[in-house]
Image (cartoon, rainbow, N blue to C red):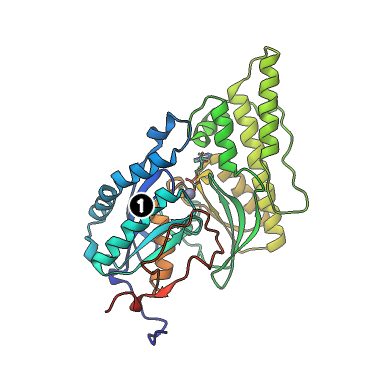
Amino acid sequence: MSSQPAEKHWLKNDLVLGIETSCDETSAAVIAHGCQILSNVISSQVETHKIYGGVVPEIASRQHLEQLNRVIDLALQDAGVSLQDVGGIAVTCGPGLVGALLIGVSTAKSMAYAAQIPFVGVNHLEGHIMANLLLGNDKENVNPGDLRIRPPALALLVSGGHTELISWQEDDSFARLGASCDDAAGEALDKIARLLGLGYPGGPALEVAAQLGNKASFPLPAVAMAGTLDFSFSGVKTAAINSMQKARQQNRAVEVNDVAAAFQAAVFEAITSKTAQAITIHRPEVLLVAGGVAANKVLRKSLQDVCHHLKVNLSIPASLLCTDNAAMIAAAGYRKLSRGLCSPLSLNAYPHLKLDDSENLVYHESCYLYDR
Ligand code: KG4
Ligand code: ZN
């Protein structure tokens, strides 16, 4: 392969353009040196999907198509750079909605080809974890910036589609230690919020309602999956739905805020206790928290308490960097592009991509991509 020394730095101006279109946010960002956010433009489709109570895939693809060029132009403009200044492009290529992913992947490929710069396909889940590398001057960041984030580390991913405990290993690979056997935490929160009439997306609305509720007024069974680091949320979800139906049949009022408080507490207690078990077993130096549900203040506080108690460092990105955004994709892509690794123009969209998928994500050395 290449005779270039490993230390060679590949990126012009050390700038990466990130593109994210896996679900219902159209986002583009420019980051410098793999950690400094110069711009992070997020165009949310929430208002469109709200009326349907969830994401409609065909509408999501169409909106990405309509918005992406404008969002990319804005990201370059906000960062004060042009495409010619950018060293490489990082794009989410899975997992996610196939039509939505294809808009980002084909845009990244055409831009990279036109500008004759390398591009790299990024696993969305890896992007969430790498959000922890981004420096936020935001006070919300749990990591104050002096904690060096590098493998080995333990990661907790809590998003709309995934609830997983992951070992980020020294050789930069990922191993799944535990995962939800059924619903992801975000999915379960969204479902109960919808049944409570709190709209879409449910997680943030449930957080607000839960602040006003009393969890003891709506008893729910504890979420138990003894002897494994796996999760299961469908049992507690069904118990909540059954209790609400029973109350309505008996003409008892269902107090929305109490249900919200009880359900959120049950889900978060399961997440925190499994995370504590994983820390006790694997003794990592640092716990990296990632994914949209990590924007929740109650969960952030419980994880802070657990890590303090178990004497483990904790990193949680600012809330805006926990939910879908392109800066996290650029951060994950930077780690590959800066080492000369990129994707071929034959890269596809992979809706079911796993964190340890080495079959679909094969990286090439960028010097071979274009004749330079
Ligand atoms: O990571 P993300 O933005 O998208 C996926 O990759 O899935 O996560 C979206 C999920 C949704 O289920 C949403 O309800 C949840 O994150 N979420 C929250 C909060 N903000 C977003 N859940 C609880 N509290 C929040 N503040
Ligand atoms: Zn996500």
Q: Residue furthest top?
A: 251
> Which image quarter is the C terminus in?
bottom left
Where residue 215 sits: x, y (%)?
Answer: 66, 29
Where residue 315 sits: x, y (%)?
Answer: 53, 55
Which residue does the image show at 57% across and 36% down from the upper left?
189
Say what amino acid the circle numbered 1 marks.
Ile
Look at the numbered disc 1 and say if its residue's Cβ is closer than 8 Å to ligand 2. no
SS at mark 1? helix
Q: Residue furthest right?
A: 227
Q: Quadrant of residue 61?
A: top left
Which residue does the image show at 38% across and 55% down from the upper left?
327
Q: Residue furthest bottom?
A: 3
197 vs 206, nearest the viewer = 197
Residue denoted by label 1: 103
Q: Is residue 263 above or below residue 250?
A: below
Where residue 74 sits: x, y (%)?
Answer: 25, 50
Residue 261 left/right relative to 366? right
Where residue 350 sits: x, y (%)?
Answer: 48, 57
Q: Is residue 281 above or below residue 213?
A: below
Residue 85 seen in render: no
